[in-house]
């Protein structure tokens, strides 16, 4: 009870001091408020933007991909003949092998039974040239089984015009990205020539256009049925170049990739490898946000430090009288620490309120984009952890800013002050 009574008395004296320097107290509180407001707003907005960009990228990226990468031969025939000498052969050509996956369709059927896998698709990924009149554009053709691919990437939701279902019913039909269609100046129902990397040429009909929000995909890629692409390439029905997988738990992708590489002798990559630039960008942007917010809070902390230091010089006689009346060093420390805590808590709470209002306001701001068709308002994250972190920053900063002045006040010698 005595401790509680002492704290109540210290708080009463602290409030009296703060009222006597009301303007400076308000300035210090506003400094903390601005710091927390900026922190909450920037973290909410930048994190929301990061989450939106990641969602788009990951929506178009499998958790795990298996493929067959053509590599240079590790050795030469000379190494087998002349084992006791050092053989140097320049410009070694890669193996003349197909990029198809051995027993790929059988592997897809086997992996469909794996409880860790939520969706899987076997497809063909090949370079082609799109030609219309004098326009020739290098791009990528994806041969897919629509139902399997749709379960992976929700293609139907990205359709702008036409239909994906016509791929399996209309021979030599394709659905292309809107950026590619714009560059070729074609629309649904138009015909154009397509040349494979082997030199085979075909006429295809555009039966739809899609838009993912990823510029590189929309300007380069198109989809056709798996059978159509196999016919274009002149390969058997078992030919596939990619197995793309989505998992129930995406964090299992790296170890599962290694497991499947060893089991089937394929190359593999996971979502962390494929999206390394995006993930690294998230880290850098977060560092910038926290750096700016901490800097603002440190400036506010110095303001509190200066105000409390000046208050101590002005209240030297009051402090001496209090100590002469029996107040201990700890009591004096608490008087000034409580002032710092009041400023910190008030500023932090106001900062959270204003930060939320700014974030909520910008989340309602309409935003139109020709690239990101699914974005109609600016993305903002309202994760409670950012508000807890901002409040904690405010309290810690102001407490540290008030500690040194309070320590100095507790060391005042009342006899020296009262003697003048």
Image (spheres, rainbow, N blue to C red):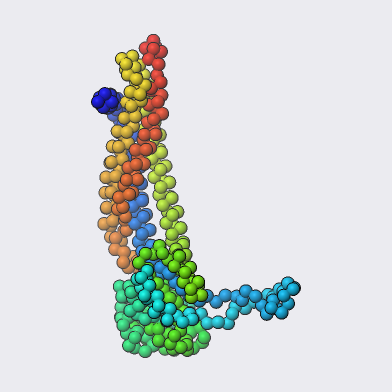
Direction from residue 23 to residue 287 in the image, left or right: right
Residue 30: give x, y in percent of width and height. 32, 38
Residue lying farthest to the right in this orientation: 85
Name the foreground residue: 127 vs 187.
127
Position of residue 359 relative to residue 165, above or below, is: above
Residue lying farthest to the top in this orientation: 419
Q: Residue 74 is drawn in which quadrant?
A: bottom right
Which of the 4 quarters of the picture holds residue 78? bottom right
Q: Residue at x 45, y 77 (%)?
A: 242
Number of numbered discs on residues: 0
Taking the image as drawn, is residue 129 in sight?
no
Measuring from the top left, give residue 15's x and y in whole percent.
27, 27
Q: Residue at x 40, y 86 (%)?
A: 227
Q: Is residue 242 left or right of residue 95?
A: left
Image side of residue 369 versus residue 288, left or right: left
On-image quarter of the N terminus: top left
Residue at point 40%, 49% (across, down): 289
The spot of residue 183 in percent (x, y) is 41, 76
Identify the image quadrant of the C terminus.
top left
Residue at 28 percent across and 56 percent down: it is 363
Residue in the foreground of this view, choosing between 259 and 6:
259
Does 151 appear above or below 399? Answer: below
Query: Is 84 drawn above or below residue 381 in the view shown?
Result: below
Q: Position of residue 229 (x, y in %)?
A: 43, 85
């Amino acid at each position: 009870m005595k401790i509680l009574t002492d704290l109540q008395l210290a708080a009463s004296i602290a409030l009296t001091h703060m009222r006597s320097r009301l303007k400076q107290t308000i300035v210090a509180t506003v400094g903390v408020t601005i710091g927390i407001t900026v922190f909450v707003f920037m973290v909410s907005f930048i994190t929301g933007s990061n989450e939106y960009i990641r969602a788009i990228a990951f929506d178009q990226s499998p958790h795990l991909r298996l493929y067959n990468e053509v590599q240079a031969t590790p050795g030469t025939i000379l190494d087998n003949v002349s084992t006791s000498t050092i053989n140097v052969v320049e410009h070694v050509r890669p193996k003349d092998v197909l990029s198809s996956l051995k027993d790929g369709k059988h592997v897809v059927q086997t992996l469909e039974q794996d409880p860790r896998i939520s969706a899987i698709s076997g497809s063909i990924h090949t370079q082609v040239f799109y030609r219309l009149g004098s326009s020739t554009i290098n791009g990528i053709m994806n041969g897919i089984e629509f139902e399997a691919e749709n379960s992976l990437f929700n293609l139907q939701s990205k359709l702008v015009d036409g239909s994906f279902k016509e791929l399996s019913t209309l021979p030599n039909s394709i659905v292309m990205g809107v950026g590619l269609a714009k560059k070729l100046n074609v629309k649904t129902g138009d015909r154009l020539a397509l040349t494979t990397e082997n030199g085979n040429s075909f006429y295809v009909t555009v039966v739809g256009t899609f838009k993912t929000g990823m510029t590189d995909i929309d300007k380069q890629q198109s989809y056709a049925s798996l059978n159509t692409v196999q016919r274009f390439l002149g390969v058997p029905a078992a030919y596939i170049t990619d197995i793309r997988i989505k998992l129930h738990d995406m964090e299992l992708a790296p170890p599962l990739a290694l497991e499947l590489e060893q089991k089937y002798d394929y190359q593999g990559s996971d979502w962390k490898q494929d999206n390394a630039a995006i993930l690294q960008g998230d880290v850098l942007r977060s560092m910038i946000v926290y750096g700016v917010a901490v800097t603002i809070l440190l400036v506010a902390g110095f303001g509190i430090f200066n105000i409390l230091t000046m208050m101590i010089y002005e209240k030297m006689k009051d402090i001496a009288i209090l100590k002469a009346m029996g107040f201990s060093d700890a009591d004096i420390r608490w008087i000034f620490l409580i002032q710092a805590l009041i400023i910190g808590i008030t500023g932090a709470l106001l900062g959270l309120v204003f930060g939320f209002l700014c974030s909520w306001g910008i989340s309602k701001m309409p935003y139109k984009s020709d690239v990101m068709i699914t974005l109609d308002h600016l993305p903002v994250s309202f994760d409670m952890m950012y508000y807890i972190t901002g409040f904690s920053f405010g309290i810690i900063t102001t407490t540290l800013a008030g500690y040194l002045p309070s320590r100095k006040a507790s060391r005042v010698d009342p006899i020296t002050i009262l003697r003048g």
